[in-house]
Amino acid sequence: MEILKILAVVIFGVVLCGIESLGDGEHLVFDYYKETCPFVEDIVRRQVEIAVLRDPRMAASLLRLHFHDCFVMRGGPGWEVLLGRKDSLKASFDGANKYIPSPNASLETLIANFQQQGLDVGDLVALSGSHTIGKARCLSFRQRVYQKNPEEEHDRYKGHNTYRRVLRSICPKTGQDQRIAPLDFGTPARFDNHYFLSILQGKGLLGSDNVLITQDYEGDIRRQVWSYASDQTLFFASFVKSIVKMGNINVLTAHQGEVRKNCRVTNY
């Protein structure tokens, strides 16, 4: 509910500033609201800062919202955002989730999902790094916790056992679906490269995190993960490039869309 309140404030501010005066622009630009609402970025930034201070999970929630719509983080990189994009004239729950990968998806499925949106394997790995912040519900990682994994069963050092026991204490075999666990146990509230260190150790929370390593039979993804795990600056640069690319998927401008007064439904 809190994220909806944040969006309501942001959208209300934009509506008050006059959303139609620049509605004929055919392309996204950095200064879209320069004349109609010159302080819009300050308004949005302030509301996001307040929300994240109240609840650190809001940073991850907003990042996930961006992922949903396209296909101030905590210590992470920044980038310039082109403005002027509009919301769809259709509202569909099924449509919004159609191409969102399952938390238990195979590597092959993940790659196919991303390719359908014009994103490549490099983008998949870089954007997976967003799991360095945020939390997931038990329902999302139960299968990963209780399924038998031959590789882990034959690990003589039993390095996975402690992590698995912790997850099982949070998420029982049945019930408690809404319990949550951090996607990155190491630095759960900081946007950094620790996520990649975790999946190299088999400690990704979601099944779709771990398959980046366990199902990468060619080794190309593993090498990219190693690069990000050892060089945070490289990860940040790649992440920015990929999220900007993702943000430009199927963009609606001018009269192709609208600015919704209620993000859940169309205006008419």
Image (cartoon, grey):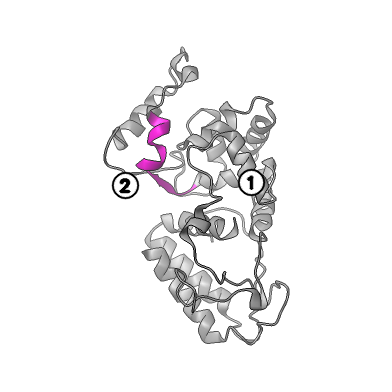
Residue range of the region highlighted in magenta in the rendering: 133-145
Q: Is residue 142 magenta?
A: yes
Q: Is residue 31 visible?
A: yes
Residue 124, relative to residue 87: is it above or below?
above
Compared across the picture, whether 116 is left or right of 191 comes to: right
The answer to which of 165 and 26 lies nearer the viewer is: 26
Give percent across and percent down for residue 210.
52, 32
The answer to which of 98 and 198 lies nearer the viewer is: 98
Q: Image quadrant for the N terminus? A: bottom left
Give percent across and percent down for residue 259.
55, 76
Q: Is residue 122 magenta?
A: no
Badges 1 and 2: C-beta atoms under 8 Å apart?
no
To which quarter of the image does residue 57 belong? bottom left
Q: Which mark is residue 114?
A: 1
Q: How many numbered callouts?
A: 2
Q: Main secondary structure of the magenta part?
A: helix
**Residue under label 2:** 178
The alpha-carbon separation of the residues under discs 1 and 2 comes to 28 Å
Give percent across and percent down for residue 103.
48, 41
Give percent across and percent down for residue 29.
71, 73
Compared across the picture, whether 42 is left or right of 186 comes to: right
The answer to which of 115 and 149 lies nearer the viewer is: 115
Q: Secondary structure at mark 1?
A: helix
At x 61% / y 82%, what residue is drawn?
Answer: 38
What residue type is disc 2 on?
Gln
- Give the farthest residue toward the left: 175
**Other residues around mark 1 within 10 Å, as few (<14) / some (14–19) / many (≥20):** some
